[in-house]
Amino acid sequence: MTTTVYIAGAAMTSFGRHNDLSMQDLAQSAVVGALADADVSADRIQAMYNANVYGGMVLGQVLMRDLGITGPALYNVENACASGATAVHLACHALRLGVYETVLVWGVEKLTSLGGGTIPLQRNDYKTELYAAQGMTLPTVYAMRGTRYLHERNEKPEVLARVAVKNRTHGELNPLAQQRKAVSIDEVLQSRPVAEPLTLLQCCPSMVDGAAAVVLTTVRPSSARPAVRVLGSAVQSGLLEKGCDDILDAEITARTARLAYEGAGLGPRDVNVVELHDAFTIAELLYYEALGLAEPGEGAALLRSGATALGGRVPVNPSGGLLAKGHPLGATGVAQMVEIAWQLQSRAGKRQVEGARIGLTQCTGGGIAGVDHAASAVHVLGV
């Protein structure tokens, strides 16, 4: 009999510039909120998982010390943008094996402390360093994908802008989102060029702070709210690409999604709401197909149909996604879990997806040479 893992509590801070708050303040706020939401005392926590990219050594211990939550095993997890989702995956494994009964997972980042500009690429990979010396950044990688997509699918740049319009419209409804202003297609296309065909409003904000936390347990919550279960959880690393690579093939995400669906005993048509990694507009279109929400070549048609907007068949990024909510790397994967948990419990306010019972989160991470992505994580949640 498979052990059931529940999300007993979920909380997050607002995402944005928190000049007056430290990383400790942010993490502790999310953790205290998740414990209160779960109605679980700190002494019931048997293990902790801290997800972060740029915070330094033994960060989790530093963050929890002043809360007095010390003693249990604490795992510091770094897997680029997939750090938070990877931490959740590791925690689920331990819970299902019976190692622990109740654990705490959080992700936190304070990117404003980096000073501005694009997120630095991998610095310990000599191949990536060579590419970076020639001007390669994450926006340029996705710009090449966007250019190829428009060419192969015979599309115009407006289809990319539509992703930004949808997600920023959703973000306007999310009080915790960094950017809460709806935009038009013209505003997106006329915003400052970043890397053709991508403009500023098609890229997620790179300077953002925030934290998110969940309490995971094998004890069915006693709350009157619907009990959110982790039905499927998968993490994969990128395959070495040989020869001519198809940059529109999100192979790692498709492979990870298949494993998560198999674990949940469900398929793409069962999913009612999705939070996915829309760091750039083109990414969302590619992930529609990789996750099985659209057939190959049909991502743009799915978007135009309205199916992925609030009120559609399978709303994608009702939180506003990375484009509007923001992308504090270590916190993102956990924040996606928080949003889906709230959606499944009808706690999402004006952005609520009516009748949602199955949700999916997808997060990729790591721009290194020779692979699609370094890591990908997909989770399927249900009530």
Image (cartoon, rainbow, N blue to C red):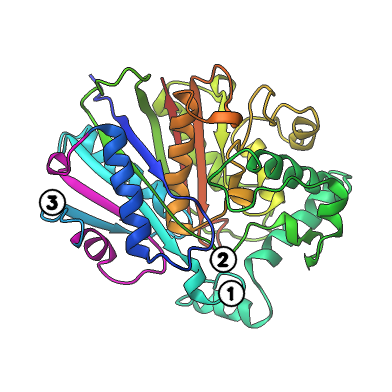
Cα separation between marks 1 and 2: 6 Å
Tell me: residue 3, above or below residue 119: above
Mark number, residue 207: 2
Q: Considering the numbered disc 2 on the image, is that residue within a helix, a strand or a loop?
A: loop
- The magenta-colored residue range is 40-65
- Toward the bottom, the furthest residue is 133
- On whether residue 110 falls in the magenta region, the answer is no
Residue annotated with mark 1: 116
Mark number, residue 55: none
- State the image coordinates of residue 318 (x, y, percent, origin top left): 60, 35
Query: At 57% across and 54% down in the image, what residue appears?
Result: 326
Q: Quick check: 131 left or right of 164? A: left
Crowd band around label 1 with a 10 angstrom C-alpha radius: few (<14), some (14–19), many (20+): few
Query: Is the Cβ of the residue at disc 1 closer than 8 Å to that at disc 2?
Result: yes
Q: Earlier in the sequence, mark 3 or mark 1?
A: 3
Q: Quick check: 291 left or right of 366? A: right
Q: Considering the numbered disc 1 on the image, is that residue within a helix, a strand or a loop?
A: loop
Mark number, residue 72: 3
